Amino acid sequence: MATGRTHRPATRSRGIPEATVARLPLYLRALTALSERSVPTVSSEELAAAAGVNSAKLRKDFSYLGSYGTRGVGYDVEYLVYQISRELGLTQDWPVVIVGIGNLGAALANYGGFASRGFRVAALIDADPAMAGKPVAGIPVRHTDDLEKIIKDNGVSIGVIATPAGAAQQVCDRLVAAGVTSILNFAPTVLSVPDGVDVRKVDLSIELQILAFHEQRKAGEETAAGDGALPAATPRATSADQGPDGDVPAVMPA
Amino acid sequence: MATGRTHRPATRSRGIPEATVARLPLYLRALTALSERSVPTVSSEELAAAAGVNSAKLRKDFSYLGSYGTRGVGYDVEYLVYQISRELGLTQDWPVVIVGIGNLGAALANYGGFASRGFRVAALIDADPAMAGKPVAGIPVRHTDDLEKIIKDNGVSIGVIATPAGAAQQVCDRLVAAGVTSILNFAPTVLSVPDGVDVRKVDLSIELQILAFHEQRKAGEETAAGDGALPAATPRATSADQGPDGDVPAVMPA
DNA sequence: CCATCTTTGTGCACGCGTTCACAAAGACAT
DNA sequence: ATGTCTTTGTGAACGCGTGCACAAAGATGG
């Protein structure tokens, strides 16, 4: 998971823990699916299974929102969809801008999940003058020069950064100065922002490295203590398979 | 951050906490930047600032790897780059496959961050026969029929899923059956996998919803207790601005 | 109206992660 | 060699998140 908050030492805003907030969208998705299948009610057990979490955790999460369930029956699907939507602020319309219309930015612009839930792409912004005016996903790309005006005209408070790493901080600063207070960062950089601005980051490279760590560990365990639980797992690739522990470093500084 | 592990109740593999593992790539990135600028040593304070974390946390993280610092001086940049790379398993080559070559899949294939750190795109796979053979990012797209063969021939253990939500579980099952034990999932679905398989998810929609929650809270606080810290923040958008607490629900089930 | 059965809501305990604060270790100057 | 100064490494305390286990609540049937 690419995660990462900044800002506010988890002041437990109105009593809802951050971990719970992060799961609400998951519940909402599962509930929406149930709603489309016209399922009237659902138990914590069923919903938890659909969302991939523990049922006790789910019940505790919901308890922060209030007592919306009926004992012996479960939760009313439609009602819960509404309550969670309201809690997440999805009953209002959130205009967002995407800055940096390269491969990734274009992919994000085309992503359907945006419009579905209260989010609307107000503008696409790129620094390349050659891009200006070209439509991407049906929306004409605007030049970075107009960034401040676009933010203010549309009342944008959420910005998505999909620029190269080098440009990200500068774009971030301009977004914040123009009034954006929430940023979703796809650039592989640490952004620094003033208090009161939320940053979440999505970082492909980091996710892969975390997977590689666990992958290496699995391979190591396998060759060390032979439990043979995993079926496939070829010896795989290059060098340095001396086992994850106790190996002498190949490089040693002065 | 789109996060999410499955598998293994945090057995503290060889003593390195999961939270620390998730930060190692961050340190590595900062250290690589220092290395390129030929900086020989760095203090925990400086490096922590560059990585956007607390210096005590950084020191504790490094302490799990061993005592690699010199008191009174700091850490040797090159040495630390090597140690962290080794710990993360980046000294070996990790072939990955990307399944689902739509907008997002293509963007991922073009992403430079892949090759830079031990990861190599072994193949691009798509279910659309019309895509087969077409080069994307210089790599010809293969058809889903060959998935198993591709995985086995290349010894792939890491798979990236960038398909629509509907196809994700099926693709996941095939990947796992063919020997993949780590999956990075971009599809907005909960994947279920057997024990021993790691799944991490990246979910744009969830990230945005979390930001919306905080955004709404900020707006609510502002209108409620007038502290006026934030400069911009227009009244914004639609209905239901009765304040985040104590409002009577508009919908009530039978 | 009463008994039974299902499912919620939550008190409690436990473990992980974070942070503080400081002793120990080493560099460096004299 | 000795003292001072910087910076690491870590013991300890604290707080958050998770999961168990059960009592309370309500539905359902007789």
Image: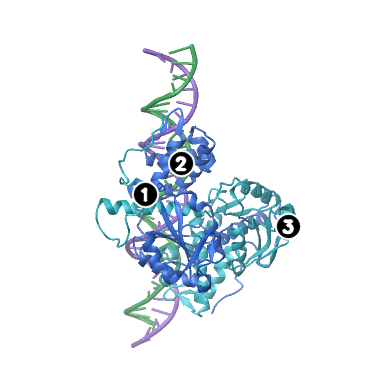
Chain colours: A blue, B cyan, C purple, D green
Query: Which SS class for mark 1?
Result: loop
Q: Amino acid at mark 3?
A: Ile
Q: Chain of mark 2?
A: A
Q: Are circles 1 and 2 on residues that touch, CB within 8 Å? A: no
Tell me the SS state at disc 3. helix
Q: Tell me if residue B169 comes above or below residue C17 in the rendering.
A: above
Say whether mark 3 and mark 1 are on the same chain.
yes
Q: In screen coordinates, is B225 left or right of D5?
A: left
On the image, the x and y values in percent for residue B173 come to: 66, 47
Measuring from the top left, give residue A37's x and y in whole percent.
54, 36
Q: Disc 2 marks which amino acid?
A: Lys
Q: Which residue corresponds to mark 1?
A: B238
Q: Residue at x 40, y 64 (%)?
A: A150
Residue kind at label 1, given as amino acid type: Thr
Residues at marks 2 and 3, common chain? no
Write down the residue under mark 3.
Answer: B150
